[in-house]
Image (cartoon, helix red, strand yellow):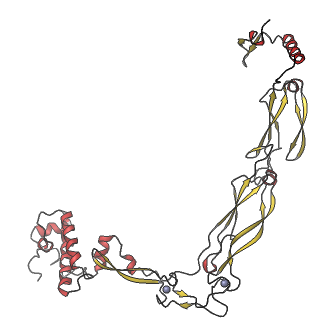
Amino acid sequence: MADTPRDYYGLLGVGRDATGEEIKRAYRRLARELHPDVNPEPEAQERFKQITAAYEVLSDPEKRRMVDLGGDPLSSGGGSAGNPFTGFGSFGDVFEAFFGGAGAGAAGGRGPRSRVRQGADALLRVELTLAETAFGVRKEIAVDTAIVCSTCTGTGCAPGTSPRTCGTCGGSGEIQSIQRSFLGQVMTSRPCHVCGGTGQQIPSPCPTCGGEGRVRSRRTIAVDVPAGIEDGMRIRLSGQGEVGPGGGPAGDLYIEIAEKPHDTFTRDGADLHCTVVVPMTAAALGTDLVLTTLDGEEKLDIRAGTQSGQVITLRGKGVPRLRSSARGDLLVHVEVRTPTRLDEAQEKLLRELATLRSEDVSVTSAKGGLFSKVRDAFGGH
Ligand SMILES: [Zn+2]
Ligand SMILES: [Zn+2]
């Protein structure tokens, strides 16, 4: 049988000048008819072995060259003596070569999955005032998550009972089925729908949790919010999230901070900003203001000649830095209000002031140079 070189080209029904793609296509077409899953005839099985061998030879350039030179890479001296078709016993190998492991699920013995699973993380938003985020606060927070069922302590079984092996999948957690593919019938498996892949069934579910091993519960927990926390930051409370199915370990609880807007201050990290409006005369003559800061009332000295846009910095009157004793600053932006709707007497006074200060002639730019004549803009003389 192995004496004369086999006609590998003939087995696949291709010419000697066939390309690799043509050889592959020819093999696929024949394999579809002859694969043992499709065609259980012993004859077909033998032919399948032969075409598979032919494909193996002709798809390998080195072996194909041997054939073209009149030799047979499978008959002698080619490693496996005797049966030229050894090494092709497993049709699974061929299948995998074609499908890249698509059929792996058929044999993949992963076993039943555990009924107990890790719980999910939970996220809760909490609104805090600026004073609370600045100096920290101990906050009572109502949390609504799954907790371990106290009746069954997570097993899901009614007291005095225990789980039983699933009768549908026999405890494997998987159900196997035959599916058709282009190579014929393929064994696939999927999780058992009766036991959810766990291989176990609970004959008498716990009356409290219905077999889930967990129940929803509202509880109040005290959260220590550190001083200096900022809007959008999260506090992680390990193991305070959702308890998993089957009483599995709880996920984490994240408390997300939402800082309510403040009437006076806007926050930029550890610094606070605010704006005070002072009349032109007060800015010119100087005045004292009382500003209510996070620390209480603070005297603010508006010096004579203060300009609009000037910033007064109160060092250390901002927000404490997170996990630090240092504090940011309070930056007070001064806005000078120019008087409007002047009555006759006020206008006269201002004109006199302007004359006294020779300011009715021109306006200088910030750099001191002449900007433009404004005499006419004041109504002229
Ligand atoms: Zn099952
Ligand atoms: Zn229970």
Tell me if 229 is positioned left or right of 188 in this view.
right
- Residue placed most toward the observer, 87 or 262: 262
Tell me if 248 is positioned left or right of 7 in this view.
right
Furthest residue to the top?
A: 381
Asked whether residue 288 appears in the rendered view, the answer is yes
Vertical relation: 116 (above or below) 269: below
Q: Residue 19 location in percent, x, y?
A: 17, 62
Q: Residue 331 location in percent, x, y?
A: 79, 38
Residue at the image point whose x is 81% and y is 32% from the top: 334
Tell me if 108 is positioned left or right of 78 in this view.
right
Residue at the image point whose x is 58% and y is 88% from the top: 202
- Residue placed most toward the observer, 100 or 273: 273
Tell me if 380 is positioned left or right of 94 in this view.
right
Asked whether residue 59 appears in the rendered view, the answer is no
Q: Which corner quadrant of the image does residue 268 belong to?
A: top right
Q: Which corner quadrant of the image does residue 152 belong to?
A: bottom right
Image quarter for ligand 2 equals: bottom right
How many circles with numbers are drawn on the protein? 0
Residue at the image point whose x is 89% and y is 46% from the top: 296
Q: Which corner quadrant of the image does residue 146 belong to?
A: bottom right
Q: Residue 89 location in percent, x, y?
A: 26, 82
Q: Residue 335 location in percent, x, y?
A: 80, 31
Locate the C terminus and report the quarter of the image it occupies.
top right
